[in-house]
Image (cartoon, rainbow, N blue to C red):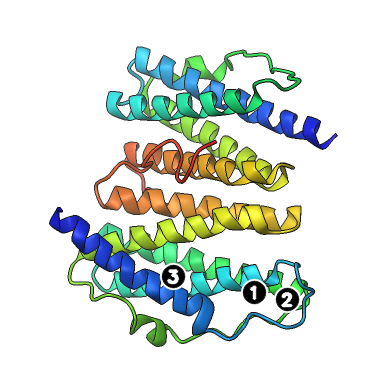
Amino acid sequence: MAERSDVELLEDLLAREQRLLSAYEAALRREAIDPALGELLRDHEREHVRALEQTLAGRDRNPRARVAPPELNAALRSREAFGRYAIGLEEDAVAAYTEAAAAIGRPALRQPLGSIMCCGAAHVVALRNSLGERPFVP
Amino acid sequence: MAPSLTRREALGGALAATLLASCGGGDPPPSTGPAPGSGAALLGSLLALERAAVAAYGTCAEQLDGRALEEVRAIRAQERGHARRLEELIRELGGDPPAGRSEDDYAREFPRLGSAADALRFGEDLKERELRAYLEALTELPSVELRTQASRICADEGNHLGAIRVLRGLPAAQGPFVTGAL
């Protein structure tokens, strides 16, 4: 039961990371993000996806469907729109990691999930800064 | 060895000594009320760290102005909120939060900061240490509720670290994993 619950938490996080990865890839193709920033964030998301897939390997999985959200197309029209869209995705992911890092049954996974959560929090800062906003907003 | 690394090590070493003192020797023990294994002792250590951080960012602020000063003040205000939350959690576990030390008492042990660059480097080093402490607490705290509280504060610390790095002219995220890896 606990193991199943852990898998569900990890599947949810993986789906969020894949959504972020797809969004940064699309933004880079459409020049909707500064290339250096977009490549950095995309590369981080790739590492998160790889790590989660590795953790889930060999378990009884129930992968989530991958469908691009309709809001993404609208967000790709400008760097400003994409930045705000990406901030929302990152903040949602940070919230999901906050819950998962506390709730996951395997203690050994809590610290690495927290580590990815902090990376997501830093992504929010980077995106805010790219929009000319204060990087830290309490 | 690069001069900046030497200075960073010097700052980090002084800070480590300060934090060890604040978490172990300088503060009264967290509490005698809660049951062993309740997590209160660990929360007391995190509280001591937060109080040291509040004092440290006050010291940093003396070297800063403009945008950097605003950001560090905002971070310091949120650190105070973290300390209050930790005090509440210790009380909810039946304990009494440790009395702590005065900000001047902490400040005497900080390295001498001669510039804004020094202050931000010191701030980043401190933030990394706070973050690691919360990540370790996620493994050790006994209940989901306590871990959730620690996890929320940890996310704030990740935000702070990113902001300080931006103020230093560095990428907000230093890598895909802030510490360790899956």
Q: Are marks 3 and 2 in contact (CB under 8 Å)?
A: no
- Give the chain of mark 3: B
Tell me the residue at 62%/23% (across/down). A15
Tell me the residue at 55%/36% (across/down). B182
- Mark number, residue B53: 3
- SS for dot 1: helix
Q: Is residue A85 visible?
A: yes
Q: Tell me which amino acid carries mark 3.
A: Ala
- Give the chain of mark 1: B
Between B72 and A11, which is closer to the camera in this rendering? A11
Q: Tell me which amino acid carries mark 1.
A: Glu
Q: Tell me which amino acid carries mark 2.
A: Arg
Q: Are marks 1 and 3 in contact (CB under 8 Å)?
A: no
- Give the chain of mark 2: B
Between B4 and B165, which is closer to the camera in this rendering? B4
Q: Does residue A122 sit above or below B102 in this rendering?
A: above
Rendered-image quadrant of the N terminus of chain A: top right
Q: Does residue A81 sit above or below A125 in this rendering?
A: above
Do marks 3 and 2 share a subunit? Answer: yes
Q: Are marks 1 and 2 in contact (CB under 8 Å)?
A: yes
Circle 3 Cα neighbour tier, 10 Å, few/some/many (<14 / 14–19 / ≥20): many
Of pointers 1 and 3, the one earlier in the residue sequence:
3
Do marks 1 and 2 share a subunit? Answer: yes
